[in-house]
Amino acid sequence: MKKNVIIISASPRRHGNSDLLCDRFMDGAKEAGNNAEKIFLRDKTINYCLACDSCKKNGGTCVHDDDMAGILDKIIAADVLVLATPVYFYTMDAQMKTVIDRTYAKYPGLGTKDVYFIVTAADTNKNALERTIEEFRGFTSCLLRFYRERDYLRDRGLENRGHPREHCDGRGVCNGKGSVTG
Ligand SMILES: Cc1cc2nc3c(=O)[nH]c(=O)nc-3n(C[C@H](O)[C@H](O)[C@H](O)COP(=O)(O)O)c2cc1C
């Protein structure tokens, strides 16, 4: 069955390592007959959550009038959500964290979906990237009833832009039989 795939690309580097992996994921997902869209966060205006709780009193509308409302609608409608970030000081980047915090407006009603993580870093130590995967799980575990983590990709030893080594095949992944490893 055709799936609706939303890919959040959080690196500020267009065509950087994680962004290229997002493109590969998207291409594969489309080749497999799914609908897939990448959202490149650098092109968007997304303010920080103010923790004012207005959204909790008004049915989920944030006080910020920015691009996040449209992104949230797409996340809610997605069957598959891909979260991609470079590692910055052994955590996800601020752009990704800002998006995650802003999902609070509709949380926990984000819908049922499969979730994939893409994480790139300069560090060559595989274990050094686990923390960032765990941080993503901090988000998805809040939605455990609805979210099913499918797989994740860690690509390491990437100091420079544009040379991800890992194979990232959205075709297999979106069919539920592929695997991305690192
Ligand atoms: C502000 C900043 C902080 C970084 N911190 C780390 C780090 O803690 N560990 C690491 O291995 N790489 C770190 N890096 C390197 C990036 O994670 C690495 O180059 C990654 O491949 C970039 O992915 P991108 O091309 O998708 O932006 C950092 C890069 C920047 C710009």
Image (cartoon, rainbow, N blue to C red):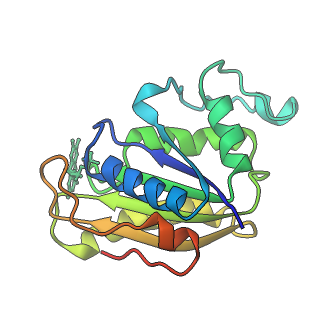
Above or below: residue 119 compared with residue 172: above
Above or below: residue 158 compared with residue 172: above
Q: Residue furthest bottom?
A: 177
Residue 28 position in % (x across, y down): 46, 61
Q: Is residue 42 left or right of residue 121?
A: right
The front one of 37 and 124 is: 37
The residue under the point 61% across, 58% down is 34
Q: Can residue 170 be spotted in the picture? A: yes
The residue under the point 61% across, 38% down is 102
Residue 55 position in % (x across, y down): 78, 32
- The answer to which quarter of the image holds residue 147 is bottom right
Residue 174 position in % (x across, y down): 56, 68
- The answer to which quarter of the image holds residue 49 is top right
Quadrant in which the N terminus is drawn: bottom right
Q: Is residue 132 left or right of residue 13?
A: right
Q: Is residue 66 left or right of residue 155?
A: right
The front one of 48 and 2 is: 2
Q: Is residue 21 left or right of residue 53?
A: left
The residue under the point 61% across, 31% down is 68
Quadrant in which the C terminus is drawn: bottom left
Count of numbered tags: 0
Q: Can residue 51 be spotted in the picture? A: no
Above or below: residue 135 compared with residue 54: below
Residue 157 position in % (x across, y down): 15, 63
The residue under the point 37% across, 68% down is 153
The front one of 132 and 74 is: 74
Above or below: residue 22 compared with residue 131: above
